């Protein structure tokens, strides 16, 4: 539903109008001085909840959000609630959706703000000449406005759910399409690949021709990788666990990487892991390939097995993630690359979770990004 239409409908239903707006505007000078302390209290509670705190990268980001929240509190009492005002509220909701803030916290945090606003105003209102009846009417008006704003923001979560449902339907169709044509595409690509090998032998004394042959082979490898992702999407098969030497698994995963001038450092421990080797190779390949594409100069791969758990960490010195990218990294069909498909990280997450493991991503304070997966190997 359009945010403005929703606001107008709820305002009629709740009886929020010009009289209530005037009361809120009159209260603004009393509330505004308390906004900083209300914001500080709000983020004290938020930071104590690990799930909510994990949404934010660092303290600097929280300080920036405090500025926005102070402005939001003051604007509650502007007294003008036109279409532009409503659209700003809807944008706040969409921002919460982008960073994947759990929907339930919208309700609890709004309640926390409501209580703190009451405490602040109750200290000031009697001294400013407000009667008990005026204070009661003010709180009724604020309750109406906050309920309307909460409904507008939560509507953005419903919109996001509808969009994700449509994406799931698209993926189901894509899976059927991949299953029907994936194998057919593999045959001509195999012919192209074998032909380039033969041509490379005959043209090894011609650098220009060799360069173009190498480009063809790289694009064939890229096409094969995309087909592998599409077929994996179509199969959605459970892992078949078998003992695999970790060093060999990593070696095979890295063997298919395209050539690059960036440094790839590896630290791989010896030992057996009981995993689906083909699936884990695909995960490691995806993570390292993405890191190499994002890196400025180097990528570090650490793979260690201990206490029947496999831990793989891929770190790069690239730009890291924006807040939106971090929230959507593992979403299907989401990509920040010009030529990206948006399936690699999503499939990687599914594979790790089917191994009863977890995969996480974070931007590093010094710059760069880190992906870390942890799975049981028994």
Image (cartoon, rainbow, N blue to C red):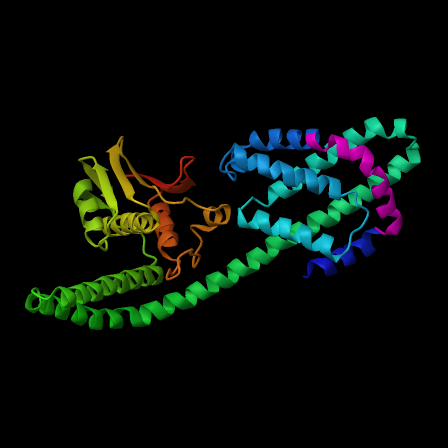
Q: In this orientation, which residue lies closer to the viewer: 99 or 366?
A: 366
Q: In this orientation, which residue lies closer to the viewer: 110 or 213?
A: 213
In x, y percent, where is residue 236? 34, 57
Q: In this orientation, which residue lies closer to the viewer: 338 or 11?
A: 338
- What's the residue at 80%, 54% (across, down)? 11
Q: Name the quadrant of the N terminus.
A: bottom right
In x, y percent, where is residue 350? 37, 51
Q: Name the quadrant of the C terminus.
A: top left
- Asked if residue 242 lies left or right of residue 124, the reply is left
| Residue 266 in sight in this render | yes
Report the span colored magenta.
Answer: 16-36
In x, y percent, where is residue 274? 23, 42
- What's the residue at 70%, 42% (across, down)? 72
In x, y percent, where is residue 212? 19, 67
- What's the residue at 92%, 30% (across, down)? 129
- Asked if residue 91 lies left or right of residue 336, the reply is right
Q: In this orientation, which residue lies closer to the viewer: 336 or 360?
A: 336
Q: Is residue 316 above or below residue 30?
A: below
Count the labels in the image: 0
Q: Is residue 26 magenta?
A: yes
Q: Is residue 37 magenta?
A: no
Q: Main secondary structure of the magenta part?
A: helix
Q: Is residue 228 above or below residue 110?
A: below
| Residue 378 in sight in this render | no
- Asked if residue 269 lies left or right of residue 67, the reply is left
Task: Give the quadrant of residue 303.
Answer: top left
């Amino acid at each position: 539903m359009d945010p403005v239409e929703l606001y107008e409908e709820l305002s009629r239903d709740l009886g929020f109008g010009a009289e209530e707006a005037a009361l809120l505007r009159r209260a603004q000078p009393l509330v505004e001085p308390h906004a900083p302390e209300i914001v500080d209290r709000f983020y004290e509670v938020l930071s104590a909840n690990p799930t909510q705190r994990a949404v934010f990268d660092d303290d600097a980001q929280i300080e920036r959000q405090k500025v926005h929240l102070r402005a939001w509190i003051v604007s509650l009492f502007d007294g003008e609630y036109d279409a532009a005002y409503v659209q700003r509220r809807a944008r706040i909701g969409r921002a919460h959706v982008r960073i994947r803030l759990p929907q339930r916290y919208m309700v609890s945090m709004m309640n926390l703000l409501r209580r703190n606003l009451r405490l602040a105003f109750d200290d000031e209102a009697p001294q400013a000449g407000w009667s008990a009846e005026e204070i009661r009417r003010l709180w009724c008006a604020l309750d109406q406005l906050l309920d309307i704003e909460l409904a507008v923001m939560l509507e953005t979560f419903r919109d996001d759910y509808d969009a994700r449902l449509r994406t799931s339907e698209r993926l189901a169709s894509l899976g059927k399409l991949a299953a029907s044509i994936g194998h057919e595409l593999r045959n001509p690509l195999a012919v192209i690949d074998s032909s380039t090998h033969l041509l490379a032998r005959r043209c090894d004394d011609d650098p220009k021709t060799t360069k173009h042959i190498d480009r063809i082979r790289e694009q064939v490898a890229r096409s094969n990788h995309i087909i592998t992702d599409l077929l994996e999407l179509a199969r959605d098969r459970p892992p078949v666990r078998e003992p695999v030497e970790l060093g060999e698994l990593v070696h095979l995963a890295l063997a298919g990487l395209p050539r690059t001038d960036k440094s790839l450092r590896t630290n791989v421990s010896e030992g057996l892991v009981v995993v689906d080797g083909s699936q884990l190779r695909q995960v490691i390949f995806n993570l390292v390939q993405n890191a190499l594409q994002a890196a400025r100069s180097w990528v570090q791969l650490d793979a260690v097995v201990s206490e029947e758990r496999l831990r793989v960490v891929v770190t790069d010195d690239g730009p890291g993630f924006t807040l939106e990218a971090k929230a959507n990294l593992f979403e299907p069909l989401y990509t920040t690359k010009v030529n990206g498909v948006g399936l690699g990280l999503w499939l990687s997450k599914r594979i790790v979770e089917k191994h009863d493991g977890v995969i996480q991503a974070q931007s590093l304070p010094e710059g760069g990004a880190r992906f870390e997966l942890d799975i049981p190997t028994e």
